[in-house]
Structures are given as structure tokens and as C-alpha cells.
Image (cartoon, coloured by chain):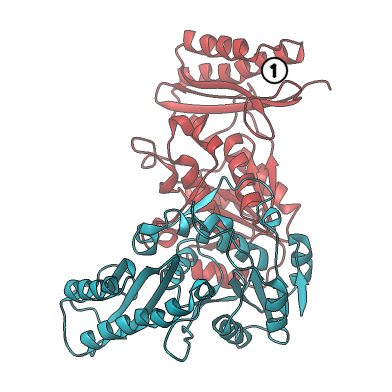
Chain colours: A red, B cyan
Amino acid sequence: MQLIHSVSELRARLAGESSVAFVPTMGNLHVGHLDLVRIARQHGRCVVVSIFVNPLQFGVGEDFDTYPRTLEADCAQLQGLADVVFAPSVAEMYPLPQTMTVTPPPIASELCGAARPGHFSGVATVVLKLFNLVQPQVAVFGKKDYQQLHVIRQLVAQFNLPVEIIGGETVRAADGLALSSRNQYLSPAERGEAVFLSQTLQAVKQNLLSGVRDAAALERQAAEALAARGWQVDYVAIRSQATLAAPTSGEHELVVLAAAKLGITRLIDNLEICLEG
Amino acid sequence: MQLIHSVSELRARLAGESSVAFVPTMGNLHVGHLDLVRIARQHGRCVVVSIFVNPLQFGVGEDFDTYPRTLEADCAQLQGLADVVFAPSVAEMYPLPQTMTVTPPPIASELCGAARPGHFSGVATVVLKLFNLVQPQVAVFGKKDYQQLHVIRQLVAQFNLPVEIIGGETVRAADGLALSSRNQYLSPAERGEAVFLSQTLQAVKQNLLSGVRDAAALERQAAEALAARGWQVDYVAIRSQATLAAPTSGEHELVVLAAAKLGITRLIDNLEICLEG
């Protein structure tokens, strides 16, 4: 496994590679990331993992400065799984002020985008840059960041990028909590409580599967249940998998998404739901 | 020479081509375009010319509907010069609403961008799409659209696109008028007058070369000279070649740019100026 920090070295290493599968990450890798890397291995002869905490996708007052940076441990975990780890500095990715950006689709202003203005523009911009540097045939993103995956699929479709996007299933702790680098911000008590987010989404899913169709009521009840236990709820939303818009009446492929804060820690999670046709 | 209308056929034709030189155009080709294609031939084994009148870069009330479309004549001119002509329909380039766009740098709101809001976002967006479809190693753009060339160079630098941009010199009629598809909108009397635009830029250039340093006065005098002959002047501006910003005091690589309307026809032109060091 080769650790590369510079754009020029990356380009030289990948020149002539015709089967590259790529997993962009912000590092601090956990089992969920490693699962994405294993998926990448099934789709490319050369597996590239990027580790870059992208300032462009963090808002004022967010956790850019404190986001965990653990490059050495990350590389140890990727040993034998990845061929190339690309870990550029901020100056290497943004040698000049990034005055050109990608404007994301309107859906990027809803859900997580409502609480994080500019976030998905920052994500789309850095992913476009990374795609142009790595030039992968396949790229793998986790479904845990469901709205991010949607924006990336739109990026590829709307800009005709020559890359196939694969969504990897969310990996969960034994109690159901979705794995996330931000889980380590949780106090022991908060870690105990955190599982309630996925349980709440499971309850919404069961209600939908058992025939309840009042999405607004289900969203409201779920948000109230979280709030009653001390969560600050950003949103609980039942949406179309394909568009992330409110589902049309006949739509069967749904997803319920939520974002809520426990103390200082903002957690997100989602569950896909396929109603009987 | 192969004429291709669909994205899928283009991708199939170019798969495996490792030396592609690309000239994006809006068609209605003249000698200036053909010159760019000849430059492309020097830089790639496979020369691709796109012909696409891009609705995204035209504003309300501009000439999208009337812009001359002459595909058959264009192909005849490209015979023996290009290997592939890509002439997609609007539906082929924009099968879905283009809700994601490229936000251009601030300089794109000045000069031509001041009169044409959204123009350079439309240019950058379609060029990014075309680059992703054609995947050229080299792309050639005319210096006549100097600000466009600047925005494209920024697009490549800021998004790490793996393509080299070459600027082709402006080709002029015998009297000095820069060749442009829009010249054919001119009445015979206007065509006679049109040369005054390049003559005005030449006068600014001579003044700078002979030591005059009051750029603001030169710009004002040039604009007044045009206005006095019935031109509606958008701007005459002396800028830095590298940044298109107002030049710093020690800067020697300058360009004088102008845009002005003669009747209904908006003409642009520019001249590069290298002051003695």
C-alpha cells in the first residue's frame, strides 16, 4: 500500500491504470469505511482511498478543527485492503482560493442542507476535484450519508462524469447505532442514548410496512419522541429514494431520514423502506 | 470524418483513444474555428469538434433562437480536418433539467459577465460536461473570447481537470475585424463600420506601447470614440492577462478588451499588449 500526499505523485502513480475503484473518506476509519473499501476491491484492480477533511464542506461553528485526524491508524487499517492512500494537505487540494464551486441541486437545501448551508456545495466540489485527480471507473459511498450519495449521483448524471457510483450499506454497532466518526464525541451516557435514533427510524419503518400512510404524522411523532428524551431534532423525513422529495402517492421505494443532536454531537441516520407493490 | 449525435455513440467511438484533442464550438464555422482545429491536429491523434448551441449560456432576450445553425456546411468544412464531429441535440446534452451548475469565479461577473448574467456559468457547465464526455488530453479555445478562455483555464485549474488548454490567436478579416459568427447579423453599412472596434483597440495598444500609463483615461477616450460613431459601448477595459483584474502598477502583460453593440449586433474583441520590461 502506497501513501501519497501530492497531486503530482498521485497522477504519476495512477497514469495508465484503467481499472480504478475509489473510496473518498475524511479518515478516522471504522468498520463502515472498511466495508466500502472491500466493495471497491470487487470493482477495480487498483483501489484508491482518499483521506481528506475538506474545509469547504464545514460551516462556521462546525467541527472542522476538532474532526478526528488519525492518519497513521487509518493507514494501518487499510494495509492489505487498499493499493493507494491519497492524503493531501488542504494547501495541496486548494493551492489557490476555490472561487469556482459546484452549485448543488435544490434538494441539497433541504434535510441536512437546511441546517448546513453550503455543505453539499462543498461536498460536490471536493468530490468533483477528487474524481478528476483519481479518474476512477467506480466510486463507493456509504448509504449512511444518504443525501450526500444522492447529490453525488446527481453530480455524475448532470455533469456526465465517466464513473459508476455504488452505495454501500450502513454498518451498525451491535445495538443498532450507525457507525460514524462523530460517535466518539458522545459521552458514555450519550452513547447509551444514541441507539434511540435508529430505534425511532425502525418504528417509523414498521408503521409504514404495517400500512400507516400518514407520513406527516409519523414524522411528527418520531421527532416528538426524540425531543422528549432530550434530542434537538433537525428533521425526521419520509422521502422518495429516487428523488429525496416527498413521495408521490403511489411511490413504494421510500427512505426515512433523521438528523438530531445529542449534546454537542449531531448524528444522522436513515432506513430504506420498500412498501409492497 | 464521423458525425455523431448521441452521447452513447460518442463514448463508444472514443473508448480507448488516448490522444484526443478537442475543439468545442457553437458551429457556423469560419476560418477562425478551422484554425483552432488545425492547432488541435498538432496536439492529438484524434481530433474531436463539438457543435452545440448551448441554451444555458444565453440570457433572456439574447440570440439563442436566431443563432445561425449550419451543420451541413460545418461538416463539409471539417472534412479532412476533424476525425469526429459531435453534434448533440439539446435533449441529448440536457436529458434532465440542469439543476447543478458550475459557479464561475468573481471575475466572470465583470466585463462580458456584467451584461450577460449567468453566461459564464452556462459556459463553464457545458464545457465541463463536454470534457467529461470527450475526455480530451488537449482542448483549444479561441483568444477572441478572451474572458471565456480565462474562465476555462480557471475551471481546469480549480477542478483539477486532466486537460491542457491552448488558446488560439484571433483570426481577422483583411480590414482587421475579428471573425465571428455574429458578424453576419451586420448590415453592409454596419460591416463597414465594424472595423472601428479593432482600430480603437489598436489605438489603445499604441498609446500604451508609447508610454501612456493612464489606463482609465485611455479606456474612457476609446469608449467615447466608439459612442460618438453610434456604438453602444458595454466596456473598454485594460486588464492583466493573467487575472483579468485591473493590472497592478508593475504589470507588463496586459490585454485591452471591448464589447459594444452596432445596431442589434453585439461585437467583442481584444488585443494582448506586452509592455517593455
**What is the quadrant of the N terminus of chain A in the image?**
bottom right
Where residue B277 sits: x, y (%)? 22, 89
Residue extending farthest to the right is A277
Observer-nearest of B5 and B194:
B194
Q: Secondary structure at mark 1?
A: helix
| Left or right: where B161 falls relative to A276 | left
Q: Residue at x 44, y 59 (%)?
A: A93
In this rendering, the count of numbered labels is: 1
What amino acid is at disc 1? Lys
Mark 1 crowd level (few <14, some 14–19, many ≥20, 10 Å Cα): many
Q: Is residue A262 visible?
A: yes
Location of residue A79 with respect to B142 vertically, above or below: above
| Left or right: where A207 falls relative to A261 | right
**What is the quadrant of the C terminus of chain A in the image?**
top right
Observer-nearest of B269 and B36:
B269
Location of residue B168 with respect to A60 vertically, above or below: below
Observer-nearest of B28 and A268:
B28
Q: Residue at x 76, y 62 (%)?
A: B6
Where residue B149 sits: x, y (%)? 46, 71
Residue extending farthest to the front is B189
Residue A10 lies in quadrant: bottom right
Where residue A225 sits: x, y (%)? 54, 9
Residue A95 lies in quadrant: bottom left
Q: Residue at x 50, y 71 (%)?
A: A8
Q: Is residue A129 visible?
A: no
Tell me the chain of label 1: A
Observer-nearest of A165 and A70:
A165
Where residue A267 sits: x, y (%)? 51, 27
Q: Which residue is mark 1?
A: A205
